[in-house]
Amino acid sequence: MKNVLSIAVNVIKDAARKKVFYVVFLFGLAIVALSPLLPTFDLGARAQFLRDISLSLTSLFGVVLAVILSVSQIPGEVERRTIYNILSKPVSRLQYLVGKYLGIMVSIAAILLVMGLEIVLLIFIRLHVFTPLIFEGVFAVFLECAVIAAFCVMLSTFATVPVNAFAAVLFYLVCHVKTGFLHQKLVEGAFGVGKVFTWALYYVIPNLEDFNLSQPVGYGGGAGAAYMLRLTAYALLFVVIFMVAAYLVFRSKDL
Amino acid sequence: MEKPAVTLNNIKKSYRTGLRMKRKVAVEDLSLDVTRGDIFGLLGPNGAGKTTTIKVLLGIVFPDEGNGSLLGCPLGDRKAHERLGFLPEQPYFYNFLTAEKGLVLYGKFFGLEHRLLAKRTPELLDLVGLRQDSHLTLDKYSKGMLQRFGIAQALLNDPDLVIMDEPSSGLDPLGQKEVRDILLQLRERGKTIFLSSHQLSEVETICSSVSIVNMGRTVKQGRLDDLLAVRGMTRIIFKGEDPAALDALIPVASDVEQSDGRTVVDVETDVTFRALETAHGLGMEMISATPLRLSLEELFLETIRETAG
Ligand SMILES: Nc1ncnc2c1ncn2[C@@H]1O[C@H](COP(=O)(O)OP(=O)(O)OP(=O)(O)O)[C@@H](O)[C@H]1O
Ligand SMILES: [Mg+2]
């Protein structure tokens, strides 16, 4: 466990050194820049709209960050061969992998937390409305990032960085668009083999659209505790699947 | 009898070099044993498979065939790594860290307590002569300084076995001497050292056993004294280059050479006295008579030539 933590801390320090955490300033600027574009409805509608777009922006930032932080983590260390000296210590490959992932997720969590605070602050300053509910949406974004980062870490055990980044974008698009499309198909009712296939795809591909809470958080009273719990379990399931796959490849890989 | 510190049995390792290309064989059939308390030298020309062998030992790559053990544990068992120190071939360290922080980071992986680390870090930096520059980040280090850092981090856990891939690479003569002294000190404390090297004179002075590999195979292995001794031969060295001595000694000796004001005579040991009598009769002054020994360089070059092609 100590080894996992040491490796995670190193990932976070590395992110800090590369000034990754500065994105929170960028994010702050972005939402401040967007907020004057509000249509001048009543106060409630403006708060809703601001919640919606800032959450979408959080999602965009989070996903990009998850990809950037995770694609080059392992290939970078293999390329620079700093991994040799780590693995010559009593550090197992599993500890290494989990430590890397943990470091990525803690970095993302810290950044998302600050982004959430920025949104609350902005809405409070501009509209004098206090909206802690935004954190429900931010948490869903965090879960989505967890799935995407695990996917990228898995790919990074065998794919090159550009291939991995490209695949990550594809993964993101497929999981957002395709599931909606497949759902449509299912509801409309495909037949026979097609139906089984559609059904299989629908459940095998993580439905990332479920993590988008800009509607319920933006315009309603949130998604509710039960939904959040199910969403967490759903994300965890994919994280575990991807990380197990990553370990199976990484375990016997020549470095 | 104690188990050897390191064993490798018939290791074969090939690398994939491309999607469709043939695999490149780096180690063909390599076996070795390192007795505890020894300084063992793995020798071989460039590309012979030394680094690959070390990577197999450390579980960085996996052999296609064969097996081995480290400190009594099978290869890949992380328990052995707790008592192991490793110096990589090149300074593959996090170069954004200072030497001090680097030692602390690597020390943590050995589960060393903060207090112990705080004490050991300056000691090690002193040992390798980096105390002055301990607050500089490693990317500002010279090659030799990085090598010194590498040696320091290899000793963090006071290891029982130290594996070093070319320990003296990039070091100045003083540094090389310091490393030799460090290694000898370690041996005095009962540690085992496994090193690969091209510095044959260095290996000759410190190693007790060696293994010469060529093209991925072990071609010579044993105690250095046994390998270098030419059995049954004695070398006598006399003062002077008297041509008469040459004629007189040739019938007795296997080899006579005169140069630099000395006459060097190699004889079969049981005729040593006859040679000495002959020389005495000519009034020659003897400097030394010792068992004939090859230099490691001679042995190395001969072995590599024999096994080439
Ligand atoms: N990752 C790799 N992929 C393909 N071939 C490799 C790889 N690593 C090593 N080789 C090949 O394996 C052989 C042995 O390499 P190795 O690095 O073990 O040699 P070495 O004895 O350490 O040489 P040197 O004295 O130059 O350090 C070489 O022919 C090299 O080309
Ligand atoms: Mg080498």
Image (cartoon, helix red, strand yellow):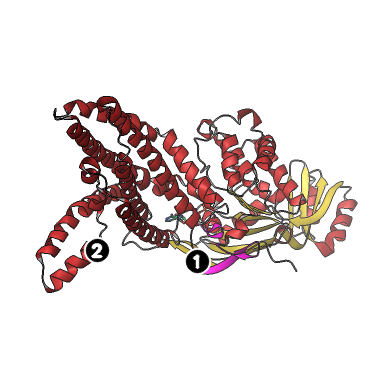
B81 above or below A125? Answer: below
In-image side of B10 versus A175 (left or right): right
Residue pictured at 17% horizontal, 29% vertical: A38
Distance of mark 1 from mark 2, alpha carbons? 44 Å
Q: Does label 2 point to a residue whose CB lies under 8 Å from ligand 1?
A: no
Which quarter of the figure has residue A108? Answer: top left
- Residue A159 in view in this figure: no
A209 falls in the magenta region? no
Magenta residue span: B56-76
Q: Position of residue A152 (x, y in %)?
A: 33, 51
User: Callout 2: 10 Å neighbours few (<14), some, many (20+)?
Assistant: few
Q: Position of residue B214 (x, y in %)?
A: 54, 59
Residue pictured at 58% horizontal, 54% vertical: A90
Q: Which residue is mark 1?
A: B12
Where residue A203 is drawn, which disc sits there?
A: 2
Q: Nearer the viewer, residue B96 or B61?
A: B96
Q: Position of residue B135 (x, y in %)?
A: 58, 29
Q: Position of residue B90 (x, y in %)?
A: 52, 44
Q: Chain of mark 1?
A: B
Image quarter hosting the N terminus of chain B: bottom right
Q: Does label 1 point to a residue whose CB lies under 8 Å from ligand 1?
A: no
In-image side of B240 versus A7 (left or right): right
The amino acid type found where label 1 is placed reads: Lys
